[in-house]
Amino acid sequence: MWSVIFMGAAGLLVGGGISFHQQKRPAWVSISFYVLAGLALLAAYLFTLPAK
């Protein structure tokens, strides 16, 4: 369940990064959105691992 939520959040963050890039905002804004999207995908992956 949580992995689906994090994957959806990652999709929204990538869309925000693309949108800010098209609006000619500073590069650090879109890069930070991409980094946050990567972290959300990492969190989604970690939630799929079996508990020990």
Image (spheres, rainbow, N blue to C red):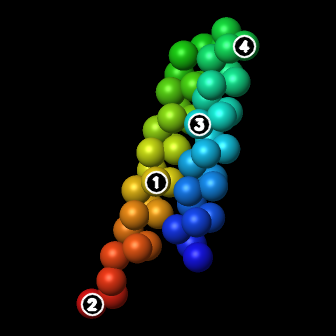
2 and 3 marks in contact (CB < 8 Å): no
Category of crowding for the residue at label 1, using alpha-carbon neighbours closer than 10 angstroms: few (below 14), some (14–19), many (at least 20):
many
Q: Earlier in the sequence, mark 4 or mark 1?
A: 4
Question: Given contact means CB atoms under 8 Å apart, are the residues at marks 4 and 2 in contact?
Answer: no
Q: Earlier in the sequence, mark 1 or mark 3?
A: 3
52 on left or right of 15: left
- Distance between mark 4 and mark 2 Cα atoms: 46 Å
Question: Which residue in the protein does label 2 denote?
Answer: 52
Q: Which residue is mark 3?
A: 14
Q: Quadrant of the N terminus?
A: bottom right
Question: Looking at numbered disc 1 in the image, what kind of residue is underneath it?
Answer: Leu
Q: Are marks 1 and 3 in contact (CB under 8 Å)?
A: no
Residue 49, placed above or below residue 26: below
The three-letter amino acid code for the residue at tag 2 is Lys
Q: Secondary structure at mark 2?
A: loop
Residue 34 in percent (x, y) is at: 51, 35
Q: Distance between the Cα atoms at labels 1 and 2?
A: 21 Å
Cα gap from disc 4 to disc 1, whole angstroms: 25 Å
- Which residue lies under the disc numbered 1? 41
Which residue is depicted at the point 57% across and 48% down? 10
- Measuring 46% from the left and 38% from the top, which residue is drawn there? 35
Which callout, 2 or 3, points at the residue further toward the start of the chain? 3
Tag 3 secondary structure: helix
Read off the residue under disc 4: 23
Q: Secondary structure at mark 4?
A: loop
Q: Earlier in the sequence, mark 4 or mark 2?
A: 4
Mark 1, secondary structure of its residue: helix
Q: Residue at x 61, y 29 (%)?
A: 17
- Which of the 4 image quarters holds residue 33? top right
Instruction: Measure the C-alpha gap from mark 2 to mark 3.
Output: 32 Å
